[in-house]
Image (cartoon, helix red, strand yellow):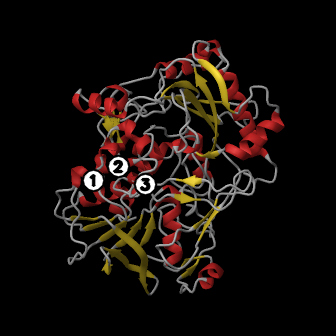
Amino acid sequence: MPARSAAPTRSYDYIVIGAGSAGCVLANRLSEDPDVRVLLLEAGPRDWHPFIHMPAGLAKLVNRKGVNWNYDTAPEPQLDGRTLWWPRGKVLGGSSSINAMCYVRGVPRDYDDWAAGGATGWHWDNVLPWFRHSEGNTRGADALHGADGPLAVSDLRHVNPLSQAFIEAAQQAGYPYNHDFNGPAQTGVGLYQVTQRDGARCSSAVAYLRPAKTRANLTVVTGAQANRITFEHGRATGVVYAARGTAFHQPASREILLCGGTINSPQLLMLSGIGPVADLRRHGIRVVHDAAGVGANLQDHLDVCTLRHSTRRVTYDRISDLAIAYHYYLRGRSGAGSSNIAEAGGFVRSALAPDERADVQFHFVPAMLDDHGRHRLPGDGYTLHACFLRPRSRGRITLASNRASDKPRIEANYLSDPEGFDLRMMVECAKISREVLAQPAFDGYRGAPIFPARDDLDDAALAAFIRAKAESVYHPVGTCRMGSDAAAVVDPELRVRGVEGLRVVDASVMPSLPGGNTNAPTIMIAERAAALIRAGT
């Protein structure tokens, strides 16, 4: 989609900051009303690159500059002082344009817990209609699924034999088969449904922005870095942003809608004068509202990968990129090019689970993934990701300076909970992974271990391995927490406390992590937010 003028001259009712998973939804839904004028600002470029739209191209997006914010955490004290890489989408569609497309919602209790904790109106029975409203599932509609929504959800067109071996092995280990992780029960193993349409990625830009791009009342500006939100008498009135080397101030008559994500949204709030007062003053920022919760409550799923060599060359490690692209683009978007790579996975309940919910999630990859795939290993192999779904550790986002161009400081504080439960759970994740990969279904493929290098590590050695190798699985949430208490950053209608005319709509408002991937819940939040805004709530 070509960007409109870098300096819009018309007036706008709403300015949406960030054209990611949530921002594209808001741009579409709000501009459905022809009498409403919407400006959508995105710091990154258009989603033109073919690797974005060919699902297997995600492996080639890892090191591609220009579509990724390429964040790194501060040194993590409990992970041997390592800095961890946090990729986030900087392109139309945001992280939905670079993720692995797994469509997962979590379970009802995740949302009932939100509501019980003060996020009134966000219980399961209230959010389910918005999941269904967004979903266009090729399996059809039922009580839990929608078939007519903009976000296409499909079964994979191509599945590697190693992914099938994983599903069989997990059943041999005692875990049931599950054909729908968003069905009546989440527990079990199987193939993920993916956000794809006809074998191509269906990002939020494809699902929501493309259908709206011809509307005269919607303006999209790419390459637009938001620097701060402006206020008059405690009300948000506009956005200062830079595009093509020039700064602009664009007013909005109704609301500013911040959709920057878990890292960028708290950063822009603080740059605009909303945040912990001591931190703002340290950077010379005029205080608009003292909000200690901005940037706090950071949560993420920490992930441990178990890698083994494959004795058979059926993996994606050495497959020809040219052959994949040829087959995909010239033969009806089929073959390995339509794979999301993380084809199979599942949800299991460990021996340490504190309640009835699954507390471990698997993503199986028929390739060797070390350091997010940035470190290529020789030969062929396979990788089993495992993460603990409800970590107790909390981190924070803080400013590094008073300039939007400087990346904020990310302190994830993994494994920092005082009881040490998160580390015990990560050890459990590694042990369950080892158990699954040892099953007979892998006998025809199993080569030497890679990470960890031995199969007989005790708990202490596994803990050391986790501290040395665990990484993010890309699910940060919580830094603009939604709630009814005075410490919450936004209220249950997602309005920023202490000011008027400003909302945050993205994964940062989640009070706690849902049990699974976060893209579908983020889109659900935006769908419900759009309805609240249009209703004048």
Q: Is residue 353 above or below residue 8?
A: above
Label count reads: 3
Task: Tell me the quadrant of the picture where the N terminus can be found.
Answer: bottom left
Image location of residue 476, percent across then percent down: 56, 53
Quadrant assignment, res 450: top right
Q: Quadrant of residue 401?
A: bottom right
Q: Is mark 1 on a helix, strand or loop?
A: helix
Picture disc at residue 209: 1
Lower position in the chain sequence, tag 2 or tag 3? 3
**Which structural element holds mark 3?**
loop
Residue type at numbered disc 1:
Leu
Q: Which residue is drawn at 48% across and 63% down?
A: 494
Q: Distance between the residues labelled 1 and 3?
A: 16 Å
Q: Nearer the viewer, mark 2 or mark 3?
A: 3
Task: For marks 2 and 3, give the CA distance.
Answer: 12 Å
Q: Position of residue 283 (x, y in %)?
A: 59, 83
Residue 518 x %, y %:
50, 46
Can the viewer see residue 498 in this picture?
A: no
Q: What element carries label 2?
A: helix
Q: Which of 228 and 145 is in front in this view?
A: 228
Q: Are marks 2 and 1 in contact (CB under 8 Å)?
A: yes
Quarter occupied by the C terminus: bottom left
Is 506 positioned to the left or the right of 287 in the image? left
Where residue 130 appears, as percent x and y from the top left, is 40, 46
Label 3 near label 1: C-beta < 8 Å? no
Residue located beneath label 2 in the image: 204
Q: How crowded is mark 1: few (under 14 residues within 10 Å), some or many (20 or more)?
A: many
Q: In this view, does 21 lie above or below 259?
A: above
Q: Which amino acid does label 2 sit on?
A: Ser
Disc 2 to disc 1, how far (Cα)? 7 Å
Residue labelled with disc 3: 89
